[in-house]
Image (spheres, grey):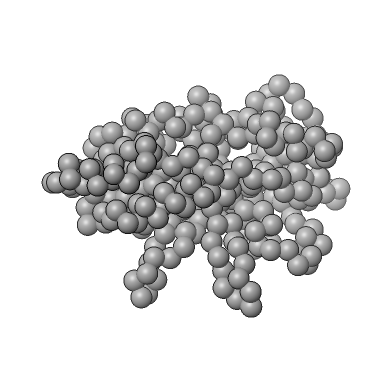
Amino acid sequence: MAQSGEPNCAASREPSLLSVNASTQDNLERLGWDTFFSAQAADHPGLIPARVSRPDLNRYHLLSATGPLVGLLPGRARSAGQSKADLPTVGDWVLVSPIEEGQEDADAVPTVLIEVTLNRKSKFSRKEAGERYDEQVVAANIDTVFLVTGLDDNFNVKRIERYLLLAWTSGASPVIVLSKVDLCENLPPRLDKVEKIAMKTPIHVVSATNGQGMEGLREYVTRGKTVALLGSSGVGKSTITNYAATKSKSVSASQISAGKTAEGREKPPSNSFSKTCRLEQSSR
């Protein structure tokens, strides 16, 4: 969810991307930059911090203090026999260098070379089967994750327990969001079941349809924080995202879906950033 005041992109067409001033530093902090990442970047002077908003097959869409960038990964990084977990993913902070070749189109998004992927604060990952089991990180550096479950036929306490374990393992702070309360006729017993397994995790009962309880989610949507939504398809993740985008100066959110296989088993989470769910932080 892009906020109304995005990082100032006026400098994104300047010949040098390396200039740092109070404005660009503020833009970095709005994107989630803090001392955890700046301490790592200190070992690589001259490189530019940027955050991955979307990976494509051969390039990465990045957000920097001066605007959007397109990042290319050196061939040596792809051919070094690395695990997929070592490759940049959504939410990662990377350090980049400008590519010297001039671009004919002055309005084109600058292309840069990804030199370093910084260590992560948190990560959501899944195992991939193949010749060997490999870890694929689907989202990184998430501060808060909304565990969204519908209070309709989607309600499943065991699933919420699995989501909690996944969130605690990731390093992000979980918040249980029980959606579609407007469709629930037996809230007290369901809420009691969730409270018994929540282990002091905050619980919010909401309806994105009529706005009930939605204001309570805004306390997690603050400057420089990244929020993700984890839940099955159809529980209201997009509706919650859109509500927050129109009702508040909100953080952009990653939607991490956990659907089902053809056999009915739950699939591991995979990132499903929509066009309106970019990693751009709130100015609050």
Q: Nearer the viewer, residue 255 or 177?
A: 177
Residue pictured at 75% horizontal, 57% vertical: 73
Q: Position of residue 264 (x, y in %)?
A: 34, 71
Q: Residue at x 34, y 30 (%)?
A: 216
**Does residue 40 show up?**
yes
Viewed as shown, does residue 135 lie left or right of 156?
right
Q: Is residue 171 above or below residue 156?
A: above
* Residue positioned 49% across, 29% down in the render: 222
Residue lying farthest to the top in this orientation: 22
The location of residue 77, given as percent across then percent down, is 78, 60
| Residue nearest the observer in this picture, 249 or 257 | 257
Asked if residue 213 lies left or right of residue 251, the reply is left
The quadrant where residue 201 appears = top left
Identify the residue shown where x is 41% and y is 49%.
164
255 horizontally vs 101: left or right: left
Q: Tell me if residue 240 can be seen.
A: no
Q: Which residue is at the far right?
A: 100
Residue at the farthest left position: 185
